[in-house]
Amino acid sequence: MSSPAGQSQRWTTGMATRRAVLGDAHVEAATARSTPLDEAFQTFITEGAWGSVWSRPGLSRRERSIITIALLAALGHDEELEMHVRATRNTGASAEDVSEALMHVAVYAGVPAANRAYKIAKGVYAEASAPGGGHG
């Protein structure tokens, strides 16, 4: 997806970061599903999450990935959690990093939240290790 006319530098930076973390295929699919209803929201997350928070210099993408996974697991955002566990192939966060983050979730957000998150992560890693899977 190219920058729509009038988009900011933060949008351009955000889109590059979003593609680097989530992959071109994911971003293209998300863009294809966008409608006028969520156009402003898509701009907001591209600029705010990806162009601002994820593009800041203070933490590595690996560290941001681990933090994001822990927060999504703690809050029970399963679809986003699955997406970000898949994205670890691009962020450098290992399965061990994910497991450590989920141990923190168990202590600070509850065992049921961590249990659900482990189930999701195990599914992503099993899918990736199957023939034709893509998690490295």
Image (cartoon, grey):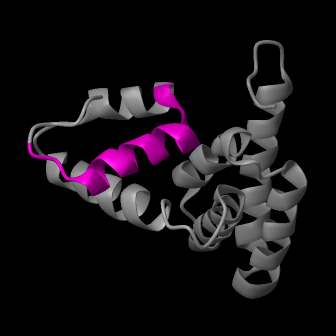
Main SS of the magenta part reads helix
- Picture coordinates of residue 86, whole percent (x, y): 66, 40
Quadrant hosting residue 27: top left
**Residue placed most toward the observer, 100 or 23:** 23
Q: Is residue 109 left or right of residue 4?
A: right
Q: Position of residue 109 (x, y in %)?
A: 70, 82
State yes or no: residue 15 in magenta.
yes
Give coordinates of residue 9: x percent, y percent. Answer: 26, 52
Instruction: Find residue 90 and report its horizontal and vertical position in percent.
Output: 67, 40
**Region in magenta:** 6-24
Determine whether 89 is above or below 28 in the image.
below
In which quarter of the view is residue 52 placed?
bottom left
Q: In this view, does 101 lie to the left or right of 28?
A: right
**Res. 125 image quadrant:** top right
Front residue (pair 10, 115): 10
Residue visible at 48% across and 28% down?
24
Residue 84, above or below 53: above
Residue at x 61%, y 71% (from the top left corner):
71
